[in-house]
Image (cartoon, grey):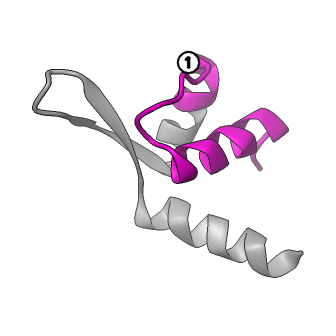
Amino acid sequence: MLSPHELATLLLLKSNCDRIQVDRDDLDALLKRQLVTLEDAASGLQRTRITPHGASMLRAMARVR
């Protein structure tokens, strides 16, 4: 189960992957659960991407409302 901070981080990453700074512990938890990945960008920085599993979790949460 995700903590509220991890869930908020996942939602923020979904909406704006390149422009936010996230807490490293929250990011590590999402990486461990394979909800996000880190990809190397052409600029030399790493970009965070939502995995299919992470996208599926977000869709399921949207249906629960």
Residue at horizontal 89 percent and vertical 75 percent from the top: 65
Q: In the picture, residue 45 is in which quadrant?
A: top left
Q: Looking at the picture, does residue 21 appear above or below residue 64?
A: above
Residue at horizontal 53 percent and vertical 66 percent from the top: 55
Element carrying mark 1:
helix
Could you say which is closer to the camera, residue 20 or residue 26? 20
The three-letter code of the residue at mark 1 reads Arg
Q: Does the magenta stretch include residue 27?
A: yes
Q: Give the image location of residue 13, x and y in percent.
A: 54, 44
Q: Does the magenta stretch include residue 64?
A: no
Q: Give the image location of residue 56, x and y in percent.
A: 56, 72
Q: Is the magenta stretch mostly helix, strand or loop?
A: helix
Q: Which residue is farthest right?
A: 65
Residue at horizontal 54 percent and vertical 22 percent from the top: 21
Could you say which is closer to the camera, residue 11 or residue 7? 11
Residue bearing the label numbered 1: 24
Magenta stretch in the rendered image: 1-28
Q: Which residue is farthest left?
A: 42
Q: Residues within 10 Å of mark 1 (few under 14, many from 20)?
A: few
